[in-house]
Amino acid sequence: MNKKVDAKLILQTIKDWGKVLILLLDEAAVIVVILLILHFVEIQIPLPIMIGGGIIVGIFVFIIHIVVIPSFRRRQVTGREGMIGTRGRVVEPLTPIGAIMVKGEYWRAESVDDNIGVDENVEIVRLEGLVLKVKRYSS
């Protein structure tokens, strides 16, 4: 069991670093274009300065992208996928269709189990159009 979890974590980490490397490609392309332009207008930059500058820029960009990696694993908070699992409060009895309040907004909702009364807590299980399918949430 532990080896499966470790293998999964390693695979996810490799995928995350692959994404970071892909994100770094555009910065590398910009640097190459700048160096080519400088070469064609015959501006010569000494090799040690190019290497040192490249290393400094590379480290700076890499550190900035390190901040991005946790966002790959963060739960989506917008769109359809962001609604699933969110909790709300019934404001109009769900018999089985009624209204709930989620994040300060009123939504049409339908109970997937049985009737749910006013002021009860519910959890969104799926969306069908603009109607939230909910179940009773017990904390």
Image (cartoon, rainbow, N blue to C red):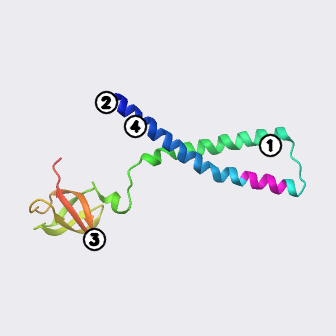
Tag 2 secondary structure: loop
The residue under label 2 is which amino acid type? Met
The residue under label 1 is which amino acid type? Met
Looking at the rendered image, the disc whose residue lies closer to the viewer, 2 or 1, is 2
Q: Earlier in the sequence, mark 2 or mark 1?
A: 2
The residue under label 4 is which amino acid type? Lys
The residue drawn where x is 89% and y is 52% is: 43
Determine which quarter of the picture holds residue 88.
bottom left
| CB within 8 Å, label 2 to label 3 | no
- Is 32 magenta? The answer is yes
Measured in 3D between alpha carbons, the distance from the residue under mark 2 to the one under mark 3, in whole angstroms, is 41 Å
**Would you name the residue on which mark 3 appears?**
130
Res 1 label: 2
Determine which quarter of the picture holds residue 108.
bottom left
**Would you name the residue on which mark 1 appears?**
50
The front one of 4 and 32 is 4
Q: Position of residue 49 (x, y in %)?
A: 82, 41
Q: Earlier in the sequence, mark 3 or mark 4?
A: 4
The residue under label 3 is which amino acid type? Leu
| CB within 8 Å, label 2 to label 1 | no
Measured in 3D between alpha carbons, the distance from the residue under mark 4 to the one under mark 1, in whole angstroms, is 40 Å
Measured in 3D between alpha carbons, the distance from the residue under mark 1 to the one under mark 3, in whole angstroms, is 56 Å
Left or right relative to 122: residue 6: right
Q: Position of residue 102 (x, y in %)?
A: 27, 62
